[in-house]
Image: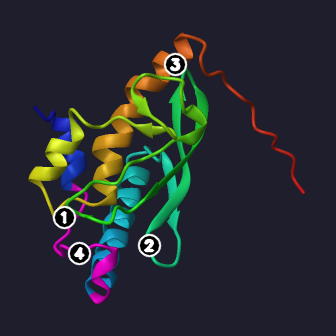
Amino acid sequence: MVDDSTRSTLSKIPLLKTKAGPRDKDLWVQRLKEEYQSLIAYVQSNKAADNDWFRLESNKEGTRWFGKCWYIHELLKYEFDIEFEIPVMYPVTAPELALPELDGKTAKMYRGGKICLTDHFKPLWARNVPKFGIAHALALGLGPWLAVEIPDLIEKGVITYKEKDEKKS
């Protein structure tokens, strides 16, 4: 079910070991270190493959994440805010990734701009607890979602290209 390209991408993202969520105090600190190491490895792998497509940061506790993701379509860069919170039952429960500005623009999305990952991603996540983390959610959830939904939304005229104001101060 997983193609060679996906396998190759996954092989470059370190698996996590600590089964802990935000309520697990000291264990959460260890899990968070693993999350950052995994994300750093994924970003480095993406940059090496000229496939840089997101920026992400978190609050001090590592429970709220936010940043930007983008999709290049016909040489135009479509950029979106991304946000999510680490669920109380993490890592048993996957984070719900949200692109708030796309809320209501596609049927493959829930209230608040949360992307639909129920059918394909959540069963895979459940089989891989606690090995999967945020980087895996991006690689196996958000990335494929963007690749399918954004071109479709562009084709339908639901989203249009916005040029960035590139004034230098």
* Label 2 – label 4 distance at C-alpha: 12 Å
Please say if 53 is above or below 74.
Answer: below
Residue at the spot 53% in from the left edge and 11% down from the top edge: 155
Q: Disc 1 marks which residue?
A: 15
Residue 158 appears in which quarter of the rendering?
top right
Q: Which quarter shows the C terminus?
A: bottom right
* Label 4 – label 3 distance at C-alpha: 37 Å
Q: Disc 2 marks which residue?
A: 62
Q: Are marks 1 and 2 in contact (CB under 8 Å)?
A: no
In the image, 12 versus 36, the foreground residue is 36
Please say if 137 is above or below 3.
Answer: below
* Location of residue 110 in the rendering, given as x and y in whole percent from the top left corner: 43, 35
What is the chief secondary structure element of the magenta stretch? loop
Residue type indicated by callout 3: Leu
Kindly report which numbered mark, 3 or 1, lies closer to the viewer in this rendering: 3
Q: Which residues are magenta?
A: 12-26
* Label 2 – label 3 distance at C-alpha: 32 Å
* Label 1 – label 4 distance at C-alpha: 14 Å
Q: Are marks 2 and 4 in contact (CB under 8 Å)?
A: no
Q: Which quarter shows the N terminus?
A: top left
Q: Secondary structure at mark 2?
A: loop
Q: Earlier in the sequence, mark 4 or mark 3?
A: 4
Q: Disc 4 marks which residue?
A: 20
Q: Secondary structure at mark 4?
A: loop
Please say if 99 is above or below 148.
Answer: below
